[in-house]
Image (cartoon, rainbow, N blue to C red):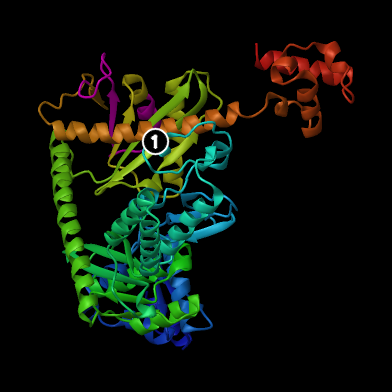
Amino acid sequence: MALYCKEFLKKLPARPGIYKMINAKGRILYVGKARHLKKRIKNYFRSTSQLDAKTQSMMHQVHHIDVTITPTENEALLLESTLIKTLRPRYNVILKDDKSYPYLFLSADTDFPRLQVYRGAQRVAGEYFGPYPNSRSVYETLELLQKIFKIRQCNDIFFKNRTRPCLQYQIKRCTAPCVNYIDSKHYQENVHYARLFLQGKSDNLIHILADKMEKMSVDLAYEEAAKYRDQIFNLRKIQHIESGKAREKDLDIVALKQHENIFCIEVLTIRNRIWIGSHTYFPQVPEHANAEETLAAFLSQYYLNPERKKSWPHRIYVSQDFPDKTWLCSALSQAWGYKIVIDKPKRHEQIKWLATALTNAEHALHAHLANQSNYDDVLSAFQKIFNLVEVPRHFECFDVSHTQGEATVASCVVFGSEGPITEKYRRFLIKDIIRNDDYAAIKQAISRHYTYLKTEEKVLPDVLIIDGGKGQLAKAEEVFKELQISNVLLLAVAKGATRKPGFETIFVSGNQKPYSLGQNEKVLYLIQRIRDEAHRFAITGHRKQRSKIRNKSTLEEIVGIGPKKRAQLLRLFGGLQGILEANIQDFCKVPGINRELAQRIYDNLQQVHK
């Protein structure tokens, strides 16, 4: 870093932007934002005693620093959040929150709209309510609306082809509009009530239902009155926030709890004055991170996620203050077009909700620590049984799946010190091997994977587990010998004669006899869990690949047969079976097909379907 000390600092601009700390191998260690790049980066070159432990550790590895100037301070914050999500630097706090958020979707059908859970791009015409913090909360809301208003959730094909009511009608979750058990007018009334509820107008809805109930009672329609009574009763059971201020109708409560270097963040989501759910996060943090830094990084990544932009809260109440709070408020307000406030709660009602969030965070943290403690005990036992120098923290497992050699797919799953690391899972489409050759398949997958890891200088596992026996283990040993990889424990897990869990045989590289785990059921369970996850991931990939192959027409592979000729053949011969039964002379009768092309079609079909 001496190269950078004086000359580099002199050339730094006094403008907002982001900076990237990069090591000698070109890997980005840290991404940061700055209102004033020169002042911010100068702080990293103070004496070692003035730097915290995390910064000291990072600066020992930094080879050079790249800076990017942004037009405004808010642009710097937005760019930092994006780069952290895509680059995932080692010394940044990283939120594992990449999935899309669930919504409730009300279709645009004129007579009988459907209500269903929806994820993904909102291209379908209709109304979207959400996002909900997790799948459980959205399904609970859907179940509640089914019970109260009985709106259908079946797809349109199912709906249009029913001749009798389905089970949803039998269990009183639907009014069976598919078989005209309810007319459009009354069904639309239920849809209107559900829409009011989802818009947070529960008080208005209850008044409307109460008026309906009284009217039915006066008209002596007691059964109808009882239906409205039940709807009111169920709606009053829903917990909501009593607040007359419009700006208080959408808010989030964010609470943080910490134990050493493990942070738990609980987010309570309140929309239209209804508590629609909560979610617990355990962000990935570097060593020696502090609570203020972690909370600030979490809020930046969580609220600058474009998946959530359609339902920002107007207010975010947090359990503690943090640096750059005003800056984040300004960036969020600019990004989404209205004022967003981040603050500690002051009123009694807000404090009560924060206490609820803190209680949930504390409970989740204790449960996480208990699970982590048990997991650490298992890893320590694993180390002792297999005589490892250190406790293993990185497991990888391979499995192969196929149907009589068709659509062979290999999987690689990765487990870390806290369990599965799904973003590192990989699948391999196996090609150019003899059908049903599991040994060749496992060798190809392992070779491709570890050749890539060595080339890219990625971290190798402590333990490699293979779903198979001595043959598969020998192939893994061959690959590791060719690639000159050592210090990795190789295991093969073979199913017993009964193929039941608990009767597996474990082979270890370098040992001729099977390994006995004795009474260490927890270690065996860990191996089984990793093996089963690899099997699940492999068979899921195989089924997708097999379905893709089988859904592809054989005619698509024939040179000279385009979409028009393919459609013409299928129409003239009544489908693929008719084409398979045809001969060369039959093909020649089709307009546009000469004898050479007819011969090619016949030969290809005979070869594929013989």
Residue 260, percent from left and from top? 16, 64
Residue at (19, 57) in percent of width and height: 364
Residue 289, percent from left and from top? 24, 69
Can residue 580 be seen here? yes
Question: Callout 1: few (<14), some (14-19), or many (20+) C-alpha neighbours within 10 Å?
Answer: few
Residue 210, relative to residue 403: is it above or below? below
Residue at (46, 19) in percent of width and height: 437
596, 359: nearer the viewer: 359
141, 442: nearer the viewer: 141
The C terminus lies in which quarter of the figure? Answer: top right
Residue at (21, 19) in percent of width and height: 513
Residue 463, relative to residue 128: is it above or below? above
Query: Viewed as shown, does residue 243 lie left or right of 307?
Result: left
Q: How many numbered callouts? A: 1
Residue at (27, 68) in percent of width and height: 57
- Which contiguous range is marked in magenta? 475-503
The type of residue carrying mark 1 is Gln
The N terminus lies in which quarter of the figure? Answer: bottom left
566, 134: nearer the viewer: 134
- Is residue 126 on the magenta stretch? no
Q: Secondary structure at mark 1?
A: helix
> Which quarter of the figure has residue 259?
bottom left
> Which quarter of the figure has residue 496?
top left
Query: Viewed as shown, does residue 19 lie left or right of 263?
Result: right
205, 251: nearer the viewer: 205
- Is residue 488 on the magenta stretch? yes
Can residue 482 be seen here? no
Residue 23, percent from left and from top? 39, 64
Residue 74, percent from left and from top? 46, 80
Residue highlighted by disc 1: 170
Query: Viewed as shown, does residue 242 lie left or right of 65?
Result: left
